[in-house]
């Protein structure tokens, strides 16, 4: 059987598109029985994973000095965790 | 995936592979340091706006949810796809240059990225015009103020990235078929870093603004 070997960039693009499709699907129709916090964590977890792929594989941060890699990934993690924290911990005003 | 130098030199085959492999230059930031300073500034600015939006949304979930329902989630997802495909094309352009391919091939990948960028701009501009025609502007309420601020500011960054890519494409086309005849790898990587930053920002903006959560 012939094995198809995809370029690393093509693989990353396909994974990013799959992640986007999943985000869209969950946004259109959240899985039945899922609590709000689970949807929120899935959506922003996907945003973190996709952003990490772009930073490491496309921006070349996997080959960059650790300081730059940590700065960008730290920014991404802080933003995603901050958004999730506001969504989960801060109750809406009456 | 790369092998460790120790493993590569442990056998005769390993020694041959190690000789044939490109020399390890150590960690390297792709692109000009100036563009990375700009990227750091942009990430900090957008990061604060993202957190401010999340805080306001958490406080006024019902009102934000009602306004968010006016947005077309499918259009947001499609725009994500255009930017991701554009990023893939830009990354392939850089890869082609790194591999010493002809500058015409580099130009073809950059041209593809420009097309995907144009698709994003057309769809986003149509969305802006739709909301403007419906009277949803900056002064309506907090949701629309943030929407226009975030999406409009991001739109301007996509436009700037496209100008950057168009200049690089022009240089690559002038380079013809000769390898290394187009823009320098440094210039390509600099433009690519800015484009990918625009994509990275959208990957957070899309679920934050478009997806109900």
Image (spheres, rainbow, N blue to C red):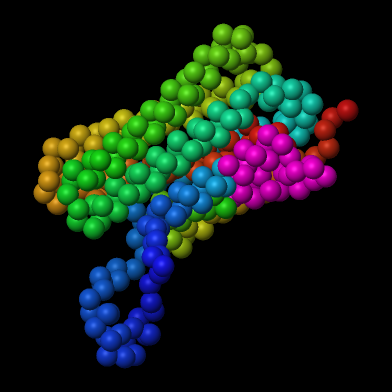
Q: Say if B144 sits above or below B110 in the image.
A: above
Identify the residue at the far right of this view. Answer: A94
The image shows residue A27 at horizontal and vertical percentages of: 68, 36
Q: Is residue B60 above or below residue B136?
A: below
| Magenta-tinted stretch | A21-48
Residue B116 falls in which quadrant of the image? top left
Residue B12 seen by the camera = yes
Image quadrant where residue B142 sits: top right
Q: Residue at x 49, y 24 (%)?
A: B124
| Residue B1 appears left or right of A52 | left
**Residue at image point 62% right, 38% down:** A24
Q: Nearer the viewer, residue A83 or A3?
A: A3
Q: Is residue B119 left or right of residue B191?
A: right
Prevalent SS, magenta region: helix
Residue drawn 58% across and 42% down?
A21
Q: Is residue A83 magenta?
A: no
Tell whether B60 sits left or right of B138.
right
């Amino acid at each position: 059987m012939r094995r198809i070997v995809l370029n690393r960039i093509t693989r990353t693009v396909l994974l990013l598109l799959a992640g986007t499709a999943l985000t869209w699907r969950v946004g259109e129709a959240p899985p039945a029985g899922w609590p709000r916090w689970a949807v929120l964590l899935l959506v922003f977890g996907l945003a973190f994973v996709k952003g990490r792929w772009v930073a490491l594989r496309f921006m070349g941060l996997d080959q960059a000095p650790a300081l730059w890699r940590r700065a960008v990934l730290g920014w991404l993690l802080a933003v995603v965790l901050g958004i999730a924290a506001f969504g989960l911990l801060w109750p809406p005003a009456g | 995936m790369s092998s460790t130098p120790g493993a590569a030199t442990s056998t005769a085959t390993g020694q041959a592979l190690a000789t044939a492999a490109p020399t390890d230059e150590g960690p390297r930031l792709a692109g000009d340091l100036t563009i990375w300073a700009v990227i750091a500034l942009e990430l900090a600015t957008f990061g604060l706006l993202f957190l401010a939006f999340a805080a306001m949304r958490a406080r006024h979930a019902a009102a934000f949810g009602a306004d968010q329902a006016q947005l077309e989630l499918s259009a947001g997802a499609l725009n994500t796809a255009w930017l991701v495909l554009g990023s893939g094309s830009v990354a392939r352009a850089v890869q082609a240059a790194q591999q010493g391919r002809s500058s015409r091939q580099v130009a073809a990948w950059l041209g593809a990225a420009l097309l995907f960028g144009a698709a994003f701009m057309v769809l986003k501009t149509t969305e802006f015009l739709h909301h403007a025609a419906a009277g949803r502007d900056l002064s309506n309420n907090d949701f629309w103020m943030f929407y226009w601020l975030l999406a409009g500011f991001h739109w301007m960054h996509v436009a700037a990235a496209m100008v950057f890519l168009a200049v690089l494409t022009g240089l690559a086309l002038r380079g013809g078929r000769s390898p290394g005849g187009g823009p320098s790898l440094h210039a390509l990587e600099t433009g690519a870093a800015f484009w990918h930053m625009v994509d990275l920002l959208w990957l957070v903006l899309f679920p934050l603004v478009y997806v109900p959560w």
